[in-house]
Structures are given as C-alpha cells and as structure tokens.
Image (cartoon, coloured by chain):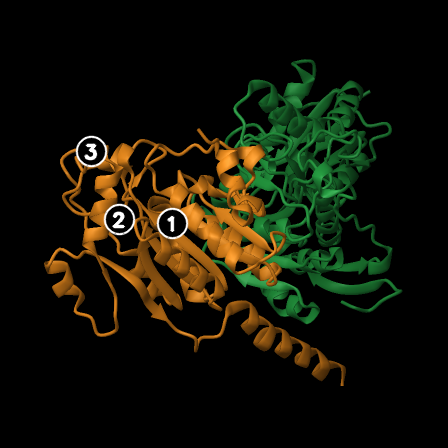
Amino acid sequence: MTKSNSEREEVLLGNDAVAFGALAAGVDFFAGYPITPSSEIAELLSREMPKRRGKFIQMEDEIASLGAVIGASLAGAKAMTATSGPGFSLMQEHIGFAAIAEVPCVIINVMRGGPSTGLPTESSQADIMQAKYGSHGDYPSIALMPDSVLESYLFTVKAFNLSEKYRTPVFVLTDEILGHMRENVILPPVEELEIINRQEPTVPAEWYHPFEQTTTGIAPMASFGHGYRFHVTGLTHDINGFPTSIPAEIDALMNKLKNKVLYNTKDLTMVEEYQMEDAEVCILAVGSVGRSARRAVKILRHQGIKAGMLRPQIIWPFPKQPVEKMLKQVEYVLVPEMNVGQVRKEVERLADGRDRIEGLNVMNSVMITAEDIVKKILNAEVPVD
Amino acid sequence: MTTPVQMMAQHPALHEWLRAKKSFPHLWCPGCGIGTIMGAATRALTSMQYSKDEVVVISGIGCTGRIPAYLDCNTLHTTHGRALTFATGVKFSRPKLKVLVFMGDGDGLAIGGNHFIHTCRRNIDITAVIVNNYIYGMTGGQASPTLPEGMKASTAPYGSMEPPFDACNLAIAAGATFVARSTVYHMKEMEKLIQKGMEHKGFSVIEIVAQCPTSFGRMNKLGNPIDMLEYQKTHAIKYYPGMDIEAAKAEGKDIITGVLKDENTKMEYCEKYDELIIKKALASEKEKTK
C-alpha cells in the first residue's frame, strides 16, 4: 500500500478496496462488529492499521461500534465503521446522534438481502431509503454508491472528505456483489488523492461557538483536549452546544442541519452519464446494477435503440438537476434495482407524472443482467424514431 | 440570601470547574443526590490537579446524564446507555485524556448493560460512576434493574418481582479492576473513592447509592430527603477483606461501602495495544521488507 509516486495495478477484492481507500484517506480509528458480507473490511484494517499506529477495536455490537467511532472523531480521529443491513439498523441510533452533534464519520454498508437476517451472503440494494430516513427525526444524509472495485476505493476516500468537510456522517453503500468481487484496478498514487481534513478553530477559546451558523454553514470543529472546552449533546442545542428548548434556537439548529446539504447541492451532485447525448431511452441505475446497465446500453445501441445510462454516484442528496434534465430529454426511463423500487419512487417524484417510468425490481438476490434490462426495454415497446 | 454564583465564589477551585454562568441553575429536584455527587467528583478532579483541557466527562441519558453540561471541561452527553462506548472511542483514540463517565442505574445496567460488562472486560482506563437511585428518575420513576424486590416504582405498582442487579458484583465478575461503593450521605468517602478510581490505571467502577425523594422515596413512603440520607447512614457498612457480607445483610446492613476490588496486575487496554499489537504489527512489517 505504501508504494508511492506511481499508479498501482492489482487485482483487488471490493471490500479490500474500501479498506485501502480508508487507509489512503488517513483513517486513524476503526470500530466494528463482524457481519457478512462486510467482514473483510474489518479484517484487513485489523492487520494494516496497527502498522500505522492506527487504532482498531472490535466492539460488542454495532451500536457500540458507532459510539466508539463518534467518541474517537470528537477526540480528533478520522474514524469509520463498516457493516451490513442488520448492523446498519442497529447503528441508526448513533447515526442520528452524529447528525445532530455534527460529528464527522464514515459508515460503510455492504448491503445484503433483508429484512431482518434476510440473505446474509447475497446481494441487495434495499438499504437506500434507510440511508436517508433510517434514524428518527429530520437530518441530512450524504450517501455514495460505487459500481466497481475502483470506485469502492475512490468513494471511500471521498466519503471521508465529505464527512470532514460537512461535519456529518457519510455513508458508502456498496453491496455483496461489489464487496466480494475481484477486479483488476489501477489505483491512483496516494499522493495525488485529494484529502480534506476538518477545519479547526483558530479563534481564542472564549470566542469559539462550536455549533454556530457560519457563511459556509459549517462551523470549525475543535477536538477534545485542544483547549476549546465545549459541550456536545444529542439534545437540541444552542450555538455553544448547551441543551435548548427555545423554538427560535431549535429552528436555527434544524435549518442549519438541513441547509448544510441543501446549499451545497452542486458539490454533492455526482453522476455518470453514459451515451446520454442523444438518448431517447434512459436506464437509471445505481451501484452494481450500473455495470449491467452499461452493457445493456451497448446491446440496445447495437439494435438501433438510442439508449443511455444515468448513474447517480452520490444517491443522497438525490441528484435532482441531472435527473430532471434527463427526464426532459428521454421518452422512457427504466430503473432497474435490487429492491422494491426505492430509487424509482424518487425519479417518479421528480417526473410528477409527465414521463413513462418503469422499474425492474429483483428482490431474490439474483443479479440483474444486461439481458434482463434489454428484454424489459424491448418489451416496453418504446416508440423509436 | 446568597445566590448560587456567590456561593461558588466562596470555593474558587470548585467554581473554576463549573459553567456557572452558562448552564446553571441545574435541573435536579430539591433533595436530589446527584448534585452532591457532582460536587464530590468535581472536588476529586480539583484535588488531582488535572487541567480542565485534559479531562473529558461523558454521560448517558437520564437525570445523571445531565452532569457534564455543568462542568467546564470537554463534555459529552451521549445516548441512553451508551456513554461507555463513546468513552472507549475517546480514550482509545487519545489515551492522554482523562475520561470520567457518569451513568444512572437504568442507563448503565439495563439499556447499557452489555456495554458495561464489555468495558469491564477490556479494562480500559476509564472511571465510571454509577448513580444508583433504583428507578428511572427523568421519565417519572419506572422500575430499573437495581430496584430491590418488593419495592415500588411507577411501572411496579405492586412491588418489583424481579431480582435486582448488584452493580459492583457485576463489575467484579466482568473484570473491572477497581470497584467501590459509597452513598450520597458518605460524601467525603465518595470523593476519595472517585479520586482513587481516577488514579487507578484500568477500568474503575464506583457505585453511588443516591436518594430520589421525588419518585423512589415518594412511591415507597421513605420520607423526606433527610430520612433517605439517614437510611444510607444507618444501613451502610464498610467493607473489609474476609467480611461476611450475608451476615451483615441479615443485620440490615445492606449497603456495603468502600473499595471492593483493587487489582493492579492486569494490563490496561491502551497500553496493551501499544505494547502488543502495534509492536507486533511493526515487527511483521519489518520482517516483510527484509
């Protein structure tokens, strides 16, 4: 991993790519609990982190894991955890805490089939809505969805950057297919990766308001032990962190949380457009399904159908602008996904009944193939010029 | 009449540790024991001469959970029952910080019971003060896992039918290396035990039996706060090695106070990580590059 000044080519497991991405981003602290299909991430980090004097701890459950991660982050560490559906459910309590207390942390969810214990060793994309609405209360969500081993690496780095920049938990939603897939990748030199660290306060301690509204929407964050003594709570709080039940102060807090993401939509929009220039049919795919969608576009083009793919790489906040642009352009949208239609509902909401949108929903763990997508589109009898 | 701020000005060292202007007055009921415990802990912190910047005070949810907001150090009010998980993250990532955790009995032993036993097992250098008032005070006096059999709570109107946890025995069995008990009445002893716990290298647990006149006292007709403190005074007995605890309990001495366990042979978690894991990892890396 430490090879420098050159690109690195190797065959890498998706989960290992996540772990290497975390190391490249400078992870100092990992706390986790074993769960299929994410355990390889913890295993690799338990081996590699001590070599860099990083802290690895296996906690008693996922709630404890994210608690330790938040504690470490408040003490100044770049901290993360990795899990899958059932563990992600347990983490929701502390996801809400990290959101309201504005503590940066990265949570990897290698999605498997649910609900409950579901399908531990098989894939799904059924936690997309949970990544947005999983914890109680209103809070912003940032979630990335890679479609390859290389993106698993790059998006983990990006997740750290976004969490440090926006002082909020950031999710990377991969799935069993990606996590357990080996792929040939060319990793960029670590030195060339953009690494963002949280902004620390520079003002005298008595002027420091850890939760104040700033021009960027994000107040600098001091670490415990750095001389800025402040209070952190999961209660609604004022700009100094002390509990408040004054409506005006609660409004200020809730709007600040919401606007962190809302006002930075541009920075938080990342999509892949594949052959979309003249597309009349769009396959809107996320995560590992993007791989099949890309191939489906090629097959359809070969058959004379002007197909293209739009793939949100950051799924939350939902990429409104590129999706609206696409909806204006095409006549038919297919949203293939390994769930009951979580992304399709978002697309339909933007289309507001003006477009023909269909889903291809697989919930039985079997990967959606390019052929499945092609068949669905051909049967849809899309008008072709 | 002297105001609280004036009263605190009479104790400058203590005053310095309180966020007198920012977060007072406190929210505890008249006659509550938690303020006394916060006072004792703060005096312990001042007499150890820690700097306020190196101390992190962490709590869970409930009446006890409100302590950190009043103390002028690094303070963290976490989720219900999970204070020790956050504390583990803080301490393990930055071992130089001194971590003091306050938990209630329901907080630390019911919803946080799993985190409690595992933190005991790891022996990480954190001091946990468990304020035991037998009920959930903040939510109106429901039964907690330390509620003695037969005693009433708002969710045990006919008396509790469940055997209670003994926090100290649980901590000893789970591997905590310093375990002690005191009461709000024994203010000086409590202060000394919290100090000993902070000085101890490893996980230390100090259970403080506290009165909740508003809920527990009222529902069980235990009288006013002074009567409840009187109970602590007359029912406490100081522990000594070899003591016949069952015999003492039979005589009505059901609060065993003092140091119940003090073991210094077990290595502390963060030191062990540096000593064993990091050294081995670095050695294996060296081996590879040879």
The label on residue B146 is: 2
Colour for chain B in the figure: orange
Q: Quadrant of residue B140?
A: top left
Whether pointer 3 and pointer 1 mark residues with C-beta atoms closer than 8 Å, the reply is: no
Image position of A118 with respect to B214: above or below: below
Q: Nearer the viewer, mark 3 or mark 2?
A: 3
The quarter of the image holding the N terminus of chain B is top left
Image position of A381 with respect to B101: above or below: above
The residue identified by callout 1 is B108
- Element under label 2? loop
Whether pointer 1 and pointer 2 mark residues with C-beta atoms closer than 8 Å, the reply is: no
The residue identified by callout 3 is B219
For marks 1 and 2, the one nearer the N-term is 1
**Is B44 on the left-hand or right-hand side of B244?**
right
The label on residue B21 is: none
Q: Where residue A234 sits: x, y (%)?
A: 53, 37
Q: Where residue A155 sits: x, y (%)?
A: 73, 48
The local crowd at label 3, few if under 14, some if 14 to 19, many if 20 or more residues have their Cα within 10 Å, is: some
The residue most toward the bottom is: B290
Of residues A305 and A138, which is closer to you in this image? A138
For marks 3 and 1, the one nearer the N-term is 1
At 84% from the left and 57% from the top, the residue drawn is A188
